[in-house]
Image (cartoon, rainbow, N blue to C red):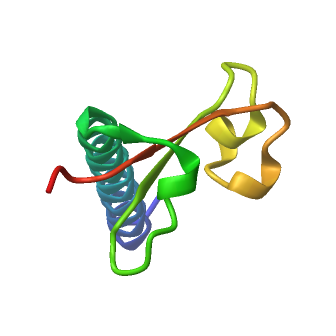
Amino acid sequence: MNRNHKTIRRAKARAAAKAAREKAQALDAGQRLAAWAKSLPEIPIGDAFTPGKVTHVCFSHDDHCRTLQTGNGADCNCSPDISYHRDSE
């Protein structure tokens, strides 16, 4: 194998490692955001759509749900628990 092929393989490996790190960091940030939103006071669904207020909606999918593998809500094949949270005023 010539030197150019080794350089290309190393560059591809570095790019793949970087992409994996960024994906893990994004997942970690998403988990932190979800934990924070769930720590806010829960509100009833009737109060969730008040104009001028920000409501955080949390979906808790079952362990077997395809959404957890794909990251796409359209792939959901379970009945997730849904809760609504709002910053305290």
From this viewpoint, which residue is outermost toward the right? 77
Left or right position of 64 against 42? right
The image shows residue 20 at horizontal and vertical percentages of 38, 49
User: So how many labels did they put on this image?
Assistant: 0
Residue at x-position 79% and y-position 31%: 79
The image quarter containing residue 11 is: bottom left
**Placement of 51 over or under 22, stated as above or below:** below
The image shows residue 5 at horizontal and vertical percentages of 44, 67
Residue at x-position 69% and y-position 33%: 80
**Placement of 66 over or under 10, stated as above or below:** above
The image quarter containing residue 77 is: top right
- Which of the two residues, 29 or 36, is positioned nearer the viewer here? 36
The image shows residue 53 at horizontal and vertical percentages of 33, 71
From this viewpoint, which residue is outermost toward the top? 63
- Which of the two residues, 41 or 65, is positioned nearer the viewer here? 41
Residue at x-position 50% and y-position 43%: 44
Residue at x-position 40% and y-position 60%: 55
From this viewpoint, which residue is outermost toward the bottom? 52
Left or right position of 23 against 66? left
Left or right position of 14 against 1? left
The image shows residue 88 at horizontal and vertical percentages of 17, 50
User: Where the C terminus falls, by quadrant?
Assistant: bottom left
